[in-house]
Amino acid sequence: MGESRIVVIGAGVAGLTTALTLSRSTKYRYQITVAAKHMPGDYDIEYASPWAGANYLPVSPAGSPAADWDRNTWPELEKLARKYPEAGVHFQDTAVFNREKDLNGATGTWFNELLKTDPWFKDVLPNFREIPKEDLAPEFDTGTAFTSVCINTALYLPWLASQCLKNGVVLKRSIFKHISEAADAHDSSEKADLVINCTGLSAGKLGGVEDTKMIPARGQIVVVRNEADFMCSGSGCDDGDDETCYVMQRAAGGGTILGGCYQKNNWDSQFDPNLANRIMKRAVEMCPSLTGGKGIEHLSIIRHGVGLRPLRIGGVRLEKEKINGLWTVHNYGHGGFGYQCSYGCSQVVANLVEEALALKSKL
């Protein structure tokens, strides 16, 4: 097989990680163009990746393909935190707190695997242990602690782009009404052999795809200058079924993320000041080190943020198909776990690309 021309649509974490993985292939040679409406450095409600925390807190059910994607992503993120500080990934002591009464709520269902005291990832993440009951705040029934990573997306997305560029990937701005148009967006000016669809929530309106299973899961955060002594997440709260609490400090001065909520089918791009106040109050209660045990008036706010997680009812779409005679590989619908499954999903994409191109070469 000679050099194959590939266009990746989308420059979020899924698109850039996919392009980087393919550019590192030692088995095949690809000419890769990433064509996207939004690029690292942009902040737009259509572009989910910059708004993410982001971190590695597996929520995928044991034995599922998604759990495999998460499992296969950890070694890459661990290596970045250990060897490449310029990527903006660092290790964090982490605690997860669970209230039994949250388990059937929106956030408890979302976090179901994460909240278990014996989850599949106990053998993946370092220093996993159950927190003794006497060490938990009275409102929590169980808790676990382990070492994970937090990602400064403002550094990590440009780092991904730079690694792609170093490997010969071309990045360009493009807007497509129909996915078949992407075949003509290759930098060589020749028609692409294959297109990879990493359009996230936009897969719901992209012609030729128009996936009706795509919905937003709105998230809202507050970014503060205050530092946290550990990364933490709770199962839910009493403020609302789709609200919860999490705190994570980004690497390299990226601020500390306070969240959050999981509001399905909510497209609102504007921050809700009342929700922001509830988020801050929950954060200083769960993580008193933020303010030295003082109230939210001692938080130094950098900004408020709203992002729309690209959630797909029924799960991620990771498969190949022919659209108007063009082989297309889909990699979208990752909801709130796009970073922590990014390398695992891109490895599956690489296999699907090989299969599709092999079929194409036989024609």
Image (cartoon, helix red, strand yellow):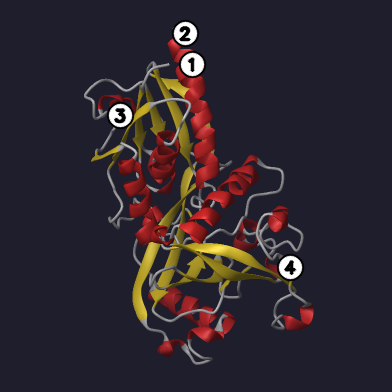
Q: State the residue in front, 26 or 131.
A: 26
Query: Nearer the viewer's eye, disc 3 or disc 1?
Result: 1
Compared with 270, 350 (above or below) is: above
Q: Quadrant of the C terminus?
A: top left
Q: Is residue 198 visible?
A: no
Q: Amino acid at mark 1?
A: Ala
The image quarter containing residue 232 is bottom right
Instruction: Look at the numbered discs 2 and 1 and tell me whether their residues touch, using CB distance below 8 Å.
Output: yes
Q: Amino acid at mark 3?
A: Ala
Count neighbours of disc 3 (C-alpha within 10 A) and say few if under 14, some if 14 to 19, many if 20 or more. Answer: many
Dot 1 or dot 4: first in sequence order is: 4
Q: Position of residue 99 (x, y in %)?
A: 70, 71
User: Spatial distance from mark 4 to mark 2, Cα to Cα?
Assistant: 52 Å
User: Spatial distance from mark 1 to mark 4, Cα to Cα?
Assistant: 46 Å
Q: Is residue 138 left or right of residue 55?
A: right
Query: Nearer the viewer's eye, disc 4 or disc 3?
Result: 4
Q: Tag 1, which secondary structure?
A: helix
Instruction: Look at the numbered discs 2 and 3 and tell me whether their residues touch, using CB distance below 8 Å.
Output: no
- Residue on which disc 1 sits: 358
- Residue on which disc 2 sits: 362
Count neighbours of disc 2 (C-alpha within 10 A) and say few if under 14, some if 14 to 19, many if 20 or more. Answer: few
